[in-house]
Amino acid sequence: MLRNSVKSLLHLRNYHTVLKRKAFKELTNNDINNFRKIIGDNYVKEKDIDSYNEDWMKWYKGKSKCVLLPKCMEEISEIVKYCYKENIAIVPQSGNTGLVGGSIPMFDETILSLRRLRNNFTFDQTSGIVECDAGFILEEINDKLKEHGYMMPIDLGAKGSCFIGGNVATCAGGIRLIKFGNIHANILGLDAVIGDKSGSILRMGSSLRKDNTDLHLTHLFVGSEGQLGIIGNVKILAVPYPNGISTALLSVNTFDECKKVLQLAKTQLGENLTSFEFLDSDTLHCVSEFSKIPIPFNKIPQFALVIECASSEKDTSSKKMENFLSMCYDKNLVDDGIMTNGFNEGRGIWNIREGAPLSVTKEGYVYKYDMSLPIDYFYELNNTMKKYLNDDKEKLGILRICSYGHLGDGNVHFNIISKHSTYDIYNRVHPYIYKWIVDHKGSISAEHGIGQLKQKYMSIGKDSTQMSISRSIKNLFDPKGILNPYKFVN
């Protein structure tokens, strides 16, 4: 059901842009031969490249003629140097797990994959700093760190396939941001190849916790979506692996009560609070009905909260969680709940939350939105959109409107599920929802980036001077605009 529905979904590139192809050079056989000289015959792919030209949701489809698979920064530098000279556009691609078309060509840009960039991995057990190449998978890094009693500060649903380079390029957030912050809070340095005539390799930051000898250019590249440079190596602060961890799944009747539970969790769990996740009843229905993941309550609750706390001492997390849950019951904030102790014991609860993104795709055609809002407006968006679309619900074939996400940091994943794919939903929803988000002091992109999906709307609520400065920075690092064109800062 999932693959069939996804494959027949509209190619959003046709809708989301009226951009015309810029005057980049069309790739020739001579260009391909020159790429072969740089990285070797086996690493210039011309056949079986559909998986590179399409995103995993089958929303975007590019027409790249070849995929380049360099193994080191020096090879990337030579590729960029050649592309600058010949005016060839490049799309850097990591694990290709994104949802906004950021790593898919808009037209026929050449794809530069980071899959082979996985030569260097070091971990300093004293400082807790990991340095590795951009092609390492997030879960793979976690497995390596766990051997030393550490883990990565970010944890994503796509951890089994996303690359750390892509995590940095999109400023990934995830389920533990409330505790450890996003990439900006944990990155110390990175190496990147910029789009100048020399394909210069910038080595920014260092493996030091304190280094004020430059303008911290590292942070310009975090969340830049491959438009300033191609990230090849990163230095990130790992965090100690907890000895004790407790997870709770709570049934809550109203969103006001969800907010009160969050307030209580912050004060009672304090520094031990590592996750605070949210699912509404429609999302839970999809998880239960279409993914067959059991929801351990007598009936689907109006809202469910997944709360995790962790500690270096084995018993601290369980005692804190027990006291916190007792207070929730005493204050009549929750209707029901379960609690587990230990990573493995909590997997059943986390399967519900991590199963949500895929589950909502199984009922029909899903239109996904990733946004940040002040927590007071977190679920008002869902209610507002239901009212806004109510009169056209049958005409548009809307089956369900649902939300889940990271309530602890205000990041909502809003979904519209329809019987069929239609531009009518986008025509009706896009201008309204993005304006509503900005009017309520939110952001139209929380952790998925701008890419192709939101490029048309990224200036909403932004000062013209701010946008002009962003374009100037882009031009400084990429004078010809050959790096990931048509997206983000266009």
Image (cartoon, rainbow, N blue to C red):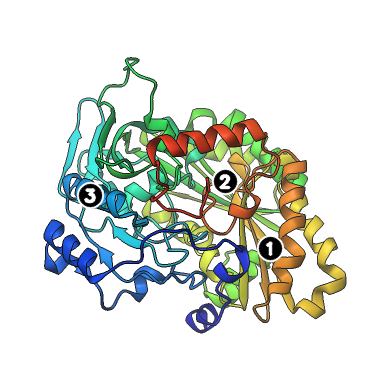
Question: Residue placed at 57% from the left, 61% from the top?
Answer: 19
> Between 461 and 448, which is closer to the camera in this rendering?
461
Camera-nearest label, 3 or 2: 3
Density class for disc 2 (Cα within 10 Å; few <14, some 14-19, many ≥20) is many
- Type of amino acid at the residue the image marks with label 1: Cys
Query: Is the Cβ of the residue at disc 1 closer than 8 Å to that at disc 2?
Result: no
Which residue lies at the image location 88% right of the left edge and 71% below the top edge? 391
Give me the disc on residue 62.
none
Q: Secondary structure at mark 2?
A: loop
Nearer to us of marks 1 and 2 is 2
Number of the label disc, if any, that sits on residue 446: 2
Q: Mark 3 — residue?
A: 76
Q: Earlier in the sequence, mark 3 or mark 1?
A: 3
Q: Decide if residue 312 is in sight here.
A: no
- Amino acid under disc 3: Ile
Which residue, given by chain and number where applicable, does mark 1 sit on?
Answer: 402
- Asked where in the image residue 121 lies, by quadrant, the reply is top left
- Toward the viewer: 294 or 54? 54
Question: Percent from the top left, x then y, of residue 246?
Answer: 46, 44
- Are circles 3 and 2 on residues that touch, CB within 8 Å? no
What SS does tag 1 mark? strand
Disc 3 to disc 2, C-alpha distance: 29 Å
The answer to whether 149 appears left or right of 374 in the picture is: left
Specify whether 392 is left or right of 471. Answer: right
Residue 54 image position (x, y, % from top left) = 42, 71
The image position of residue 255, as x and y in percent, is: 75, 49
Comes first in the chain, label 1 or label 2: 1
- Residue 277: % across, % down: 57, 49
